Image: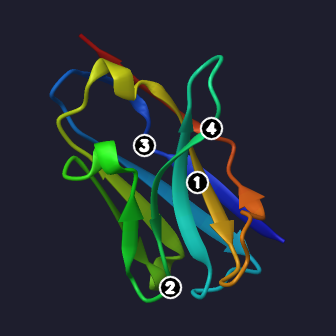
Amino acid sequence: QVQLVESGGGLVQAGGSLRLSCEASGRTSSSYVMAWYRQTPGKERELVAGIRSGGSTYYAEPLKGRFTISRDNAKNTVYLQMNSLKPEDTAVYYCAARRAGSTTYDYWGQGTQVTVSS
């Protein structure tokens, strides 16, 4: 089992920045693909960004240029740097992990709330 714990959420004004962290514990592996998703009430959870074991990244197209995902395998931690935040970025942000080659995310964190005020 892998446990994921997010931190770093909070309230920020539009135009501000936040950095989310996701620490993995348990049977972790640097080969896992890690990702950030977000969800707002009444909407489906949507992909924000992902990072493969080798460090290659992918993003939801609308978020490219404002959000940056990174990982520190030595610390079993994944980060999401969010800049130029907008009120529409308000959501619960979730960290997820899946084995390389798997098409579904096997492990999820409990989520951290990000609220962007206008």
Q: Amino acid at mark 2?
A: Ser
Other-residue count near label 4 (Cα within 10 Å), few / some / many at <14 / 14–19 / ≥20: some
- The span from disc 3 to disc 2 (Cα, nearest Å) is 23 Å
Label pair 3/2, CB-CB below 8 angstroms: no
Quarter of the picture holding the C terminus: top left
User: Residue 65, percent across and down?
Assistant: 19, 52
Q: Amino acid at mark 3?
A: Gly
Q: Amino acid at mark 1?
A: Cys
Q: Which mark is residue 45?
A: 4
* Residue on which the image places disc 3: 8
Q: Nearer the viewer, mark 2 or mark 4?
A: 4
User: Residue 83, percent across and down?
Assistant: 20, 42
User: Residue 16, percent across and down?
Assistant: 18, 31
Q: Amino acid at mark 4?
A: Arg
The residue at 72%/70% (across/down) is: 103
The residue at 26%/25% (across/down) is: 86
User: Residue 43, percent across and down?
Assistant: 62, 24
- The span from disc 1 to disc 4 (Cα, nearest Å) is 11 Å
Q: Sequence order check: which comes first, mark 3 or mark 2? A: 3
Q: Nearer the viewer, mark 1 or mark 4?
A: 4
